[in-house]
Image: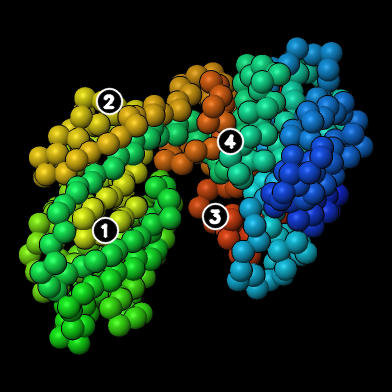
Amino acid sequence: MNSKVNEWIEAHQDELVNDIMDLCSIDSVKGEALEGKPFGEGPYNSLHAAMELTKKYGFETKNYDNYVAAADFDTSLPRSLDMLAHTDVVPAGEGWTVTEPFKPVIKDGRIYGRGTSDDKGPLLCALYAMRALKETGVELKKGVRLIMGADEECGSSDIEKYYEVEDEAEMTFSPDAEFPLINIEKGHFNGTLFKDFKEDSNLPRVTYMKAGVAANAVPQKAVLRFEGLDFDKCADAISEVSSKCEVEITKTADDELTVVGTGAHASTPELGKNAGLAAIELIKALPLYKSEQVEMISKVTSLFPYGVTDGSGIGIKMCDEESHDLTNTLDLFEITPTHIEFTFDSRTPIMATKENCSDVAEKTIRESGFDFATDGMIPPHVVPGDSEFVQTLLKSYENVTGLKGECLAIGGGTYVHELKNGVAFGAVLPDIDTRMHGADEFFDIDNIIIATKVYAEAIINLCA
Ligand SMILES: [Zn+2]
């Protein structure tokens, strides 16, 4: 470790913290596109504020039509390492208690505010790592570039535009997640099972059910409507399902029940309480006329048992050492008297193939009597964990933190998803939930200093 660099970083803590607070006071939620401001006013202002800093600290800065800006350590060096961060944020949301989302404050050694840890704070850690090397006179042989996007949160159209005109660097890391390092994003497999019926008007019957807003989110709410059903006579069945599934079920109209569970991202379905599946359990438990529609709906509970998120019900439970378990969750639900339709989301480990995954799921689902549709499997994003690049990053992390460096595999996508040799690397230390995307988002000042040192160390080890 370079002690001069680390001392410089410690001596500039206040300045770094102030820069983070200034940048986080800009509301950079995506807005309506304006002339020259492709993501609206906020992301434009935030990108330009970040560019002011990179210029002020002496780095040549290039603007890519206000989609992205990039600052180079030294343009005379061959470009080799890119650090990819972003200046836009998700909407403030509700429930803030420490401060208002765009009025950052320091409390208990933390900066609170939207964007502090996702991703303005980490972006400035990377910038200060470059600055520390420059101001302490560290010479590099290979070039480092800080790429600053303005549309990560809404689909990464920013870097799509950037990579239309620039090549991917030999190595890229993104300080837009957590330490130690994410080198694997699981693959993706979605499917829809459905069935059409002739209407059966025998009572009591279910006439409507809907749950889910997107295939990639565990539904938090389900609404069901019935005909010819006396809810008072079913109180026991309703309360049994409610306590078994740990969801709330309330009567929201004369013929309507609403199930409220807990939403979650489809890459971590075990964190949710699936309101849609609880509603299916409810349909099964209620004294409905046994129509073909109800029989088919009941079969969903064996294909996607409540609380089971490993795909075992459709025969695709699998796990490998590098990328761990497959996850599976049924997220979109639609029921009418003549049509039922359900869509699931699976995040698949490296070992998953069409033969052992998609084909097996399809066979199991069709054998239960459903029709089935899928767009096929999307392969995982993998950068080999034993590559010199990854090993050097992990060693840099270990040297600075004294913690064990190891690779992580996740089910969600990161900013480097489309890059051949891109990994997510920091900036949040392990086992800390900084409430990214939630209320009271924060970033610990200790963490800020450590991350900056790790990035400086990594640049030296990769480029000096
Ligand atoms: Zn982010």
Look at the picture and state if 427 lies above or below 391.
below
Determine the secondary structure under disc 4.
loop
The amino acid at mark 4 is Tyr
- Residue extending furthest left? 290
Mark 4 and ligand 1: say if the CB distance to the nearest ligand atom is below 8 Å: yes
Look at the picture and state if 86 lies above or below 234.
above
Residue receiving disc 2: 353
Determine the secondary structure under disc 3.
loop
For discs 3 and 2, the disc positioned in front in the rendered view: 2
Q: Residue at x 39, y 29 (%)?
A: 378
Q: What is the spatial separation of the Cα atoms under label 3 and label 2, in whole angstroms?
A: 34 Å
Q: Find out whether the residues at labels 4 and 3 contact each other: C-beta distance under 8 Å.
A: no
For discs 3 and 1, the disc positioned in front in the rendered view: 1
Q: Nearer the viewer, residue 252 or 454?
A: 252
Coordinates of residue 249 in the picture (x, y in percent): 30, 76
| Label 3 Cα crowd, 10 Å radius (few <14 / some 14-19 / many 20+) | few
| Label 1 Cα crowd, 10 Å radius (few <14 / some 14-19 / many 20+) | many
Of the numbered discs 2 and 1, the one sitting upstream in the chain is 1
Of the numbered discs 3 and 1, the one sitting upstream in the chain is 1
The amino acid at mark 3 is Ile
Task: Identify the disc placed on residue 432.
Answer: 3
The reply to whether residue 424 is visible in this rendering is yes
Q: What is the spatial separation of the Cα atoms under label 1 and label 4, in whole angstroms?
A: 36 Å
Of the numbered discs 3 and 2, the one sitting upstream in the chain is 2
Q: Quadrant of residue 178?
A: top right
Residue receiving disc 4: 415
